[in-house]
Image (cartoon, helix red, strand yellow):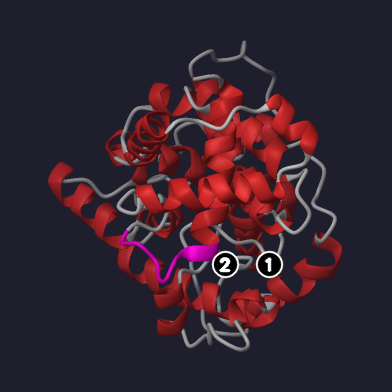
Amino acid sequence: MSALAIAVWAFASAVAAVMAADGPPPSRGSPSIEDSDAWFKAGQQLFEQLAPPEIKAQFEFPTKEQWDRFTKGLQRALEGESLPELASYADQARATTTVLRTLPGYEDLADWLEQRVDEIEGARQTLTPAPPQPPTRPNLPRPGNYQPVPHYDLWLARVRDRPVPARAAALMPALRAAFAAEGVPPEIAWLAEAESSLNPGARSPVGAKGLFQFMPETAKALGLSTFLPDERADPEKSAHAAARYLRTLHARFGNWALVFAAYNAGEGRVTRTLASHGAKSFTAIAEALPAETRMYVPKVCALITARAGVPPERIAPPRKQGMFSK
């Protein structure tokens, strides 16, 4: 199946999942394939109803067999440990974003997908490393127990010259203030760029929403309403909730790289992997975590460095509320 045909599948299934899902599947990051028949029919109908003529002329809607094969493969790549397998979906994922951005009303879904595409393209870049580059920052002394985050330099090169999202000027002062009020280093609020492209309305096919992409159950546990109004789309309230959650994760895992890994892959997955490897750091278990997480953690660290000037080894632990400046 061509990349364009696969892109149509991804667009249609994503839209169908957002419109038809009754609740979040068990996994935070990957869509369930249990309702494949329903997704296929809904996606086919949505494509016929919503896709512009020029898209229909360019894209061929996949067969059910192609749909199922790609669904299972993509889910396996996201949850598996192989960067080459994840990288193999880069062209299809980028084409999907192109399709979504042609459809009025689907900007929120496209902004969510843009960050996933970025991570898949990062995975592809790991397979053909660039030549060594001159240092981009001073070689400051590092804490004695610091372990470099795998692929951090690759991601710093990817994001350091990337334009700051247009919404940052309006959003970041309040997000930073919320993090500081919760005792979490305010620079970590840039995690919202990796999650949602700094779009408060960003939504994923599996039910996550907002700047920090909370699933409904997680949002409720953190005290956010998810129905009339959905407070996940409230920048200030969701930032306070995200900071509290990150603070809780830090109390459990003890360093920010593991915190970011748990935010992406789930606390249980990270805890089990640490235990099975007898390890205490992200660096020690990175290759046993999902490929998506192996790209997400260095990406978040690189964004914090590029946007706030704080490299990963210099991010402070949480402190008592109010001790960080805004």
Q: Is residue 312 visible?
A: no
Instruction: Return the residue at label 1.
Output: 201
Residue 267 occupies quadrant: bottom left
x and y percent of residue 237 in the render? 63, 83
Mark 1 secondary-structure assignment: loop
Residue 243 occupies quadrant: bottom right
Q: Is residue 180 visible?
A: yes
Q: Main secondary structure of the magenta part?
A: loop
- Check disc 1: other Cα within 10 Å, few if <14, some if 14-19, many if 20+: some
Question: From what the image shows, is residue 39 above or below residue 139?
Answer: below
Q: Residue at x 78, y 36 (%)?
A: 53
Gap between marks 2 and 1 measured at Cα:
7 Å
- Check disc 2: other Cα within 10 Å, few if <14, some if 14-19, many if 20+: many
Residue 24 sits inside the magenta stretch: yes
Mark 2 secondary-structure assignment: loop
Number of callouts: 2
| Residue toward you, 32 or 217 | 32
x and y percent of residue 231 in the render? 61, 82
Amino acid under label 1? Gly
* Magenta span: 19-26
Question: From what the image shows, is residue 230 above or below residue 44?
Answer: below
Q: Residue at x 70, y 38 (%)?
A: 99
Q: Are marks 2 and 1 in contact (CB under 8 Å)?
A: yes
Amino acid under label 2? Lys
Q: Residue at x 61, y 42 (%)?
A: 302
| Residue toward you, 37 or 176 | 37
Residue 270 sits inside the magenta stretch: no
Instruction: Return the residue at label 2.
Output: 209
Report the side of 34 relative to 12 (left or right): left
Q: Residue at x 29, y 38 (%)?
A: 284
Q: Earlier in the sequence, mark 2 or mark 1?
A: 1
